[in-house]
Amino acid sequence: LRKRAVAWFLFREEFLFVLPGAIISEIPMPGHATYVFALPSDRETFLRLYERTSRNEIRQNAGNVASELGFVGRVVRGRKRKRWLAEVLKLAGEQVNYLDAVED
């Protein structure tokens, strides 16, 4: 993700990667989900709202927060890194080579 990112930030215990068409929230540990958000028109507003929001609130769309953040979906990080990356990039609207994702 870092190679594809326009910018990236360390935020709490997670990384936020800004891709050309999305923002990706990643806790780099197996079993944690990677969250994908549509690229906001105002990054500062997104970050302020994201800062006040838990992942649980995003999953449940509490107070419509997932919609406000532009939540696209989540992918649980498993043992197959290439498959995980392919699914994350697909949600982010990036080109994915699925042949590379099969073997890991």
Image: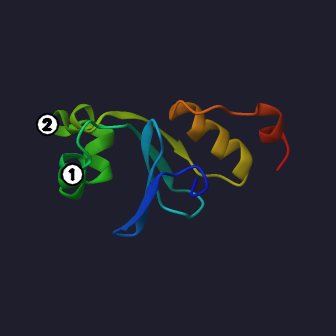
**Which residue, given by chain and number where applicable, does mark 2 sit on?**
63
Give x and y (percent) for residue 15.
44, 62
Q: Secondary structure at mark 1?
A: helix
Please name whichever residue, 58 or 99, is drawn nearer the observer in this view of the structure. Answer: 99
- The CA distance from mark 1 to mark 2 is 20 Å
Please name whichever residue, 62 or 8, is drawn nearer the observer in this view of the structure. Answer: 8
- Tell me the kind of residue under disc 2: Gly
Residue drawn at x 58%, y 49% as measured from the top left: 4
Establish if 25 lies above or below 11: above
Establish if 87 lies above or below 79: above
Give x and y (percent) for residue 13.
40, 69
- Tell me the kind of residue under disc 1: Glu
Which tag is nearer the camera, tag 1 or tag 2?
1
Q: Quadrant of residue 95?
A: top right
Tag shown at residue 24: none
Counting the numbered discs, the total is 2
Using residue 86 as the reference point, say whether residue 18 is left or right of it. Answer: left
The tag earlier along the polypeptide, 1 or 2, is 1
Tag shown at residue 44: 1
Please name whichever residue, 99 or 19, is drawn nearer the observer in this view of the structure. Answer: 19
Give x and y (percent) for residue 49.
18, 49
Furthest-left residue in this view: 63
Please rate how many residues cluster around mark 2, counting C-alpha atoms within 10 Å: few if below 14, some from 14 to 19, many from 20: few
